[in-house]
């Protein structure tokens, strides 16, 4: 029935500026841009929709109800970390490894929590 997640939406007070950061820092490509909504495509075809925000951002933490982060799959964890650090991205905690998974959390310029993840190949 469900094939997967086609896109996730992020509401931003400045969709164009945030979209540029995702393109320049994370390597997404602009799929479409209406001026108020920008669709970004990752190399694997998944997308992020950045829409124009309305209202104030409610306070949230990593474990408050609702969507809390967007995980970005990478093939080379160390290379991805190095590239992001070279772009000035700071970590929200130390990179870690657990049960064959490497991950690290960080935030985009608007405070949306993202994390890099690399899982070991299945045995």
Image (tube, grey):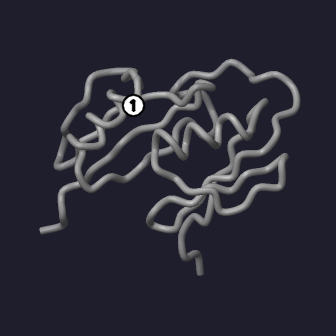
Q: Quadrant of the N terminus?
A: bottom right
Give the total number of marks visible in the rendering. 1
Q: Along the horizontal axis of the image, is 26 left or right of 118?
A: right
Q: Residue furthest left?
A: 123
Q: Read off the residue under disc 1.
A: 105
Q: Quadrant of residue 33?
A: bottom right
Residue at the spot x=54%, y=69% of the render? 4
Where is residue 76 shown, x and y percent of the image?
Answer: 23, 50
Q: Quadrant of the C terminus?
A: bottom left
Q: Quadrant of residue 97?
A: top left
Q: Residues within 10 Å of mark 1 (few under 14, many from 20)?
A: some
Q: Along the horizontal axis of the image, is 100 left or right of 69?
A: left
Q: Secondary structure at mark 1?
A: strand
Where is residue 118 shown, x and y percent of the image?
Answer: 27, 50
Q: Along the horizontal axis of the image, is 82 left or right of 72?
A: left
Residue at the spot x=56%, y=37% of the render? 21
Front-most of 5 and 36? Answer: 36
Residue at the spot x=45%, y=63% of the render? 43
Q: Residue furthest bottom?
A: 1
Front-most of 1 and 111? Answer: 111
Where is residue 75 shown, x and y percent of the image?
Answer: 26, 56
Residue at the spot x=82%, y=35% of the render? 53
Position above or below: 97 against 76: above
Position above or below: 66 against 59: below
Q: Residue furthest right?
A: 54
Position above or below: 8 against 64: below
Where is residue 112 shown, x and y percent of the image?
Answer: 58, 31
């Amino acid at each position: 029935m469900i094939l997967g997640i086609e896109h996730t939406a992020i509401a931003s007070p400045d969709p164009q500026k945030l979209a540029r950061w995702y393109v320049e820092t994370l390597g997404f490509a602009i799929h479409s841009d209406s001026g108020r909504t920008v669709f970004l495509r990752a190399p694997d075809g998944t997308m992020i929709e950045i829409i124009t925000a309305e209202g104030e951002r409610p306070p949230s933490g990593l474990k408050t109800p609702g969507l809390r982060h967007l995980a970005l799959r990478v093939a080379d964890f160390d290379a991805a970390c190095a590239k992001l650090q070279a772009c000035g991205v700071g970590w929200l905690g130390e990179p870690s490894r657990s049960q064959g998974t490497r991950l690290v959390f960080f935030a985009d310029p608007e405070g949306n929590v993202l994390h890099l993840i690399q899982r070991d190949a299945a045995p």
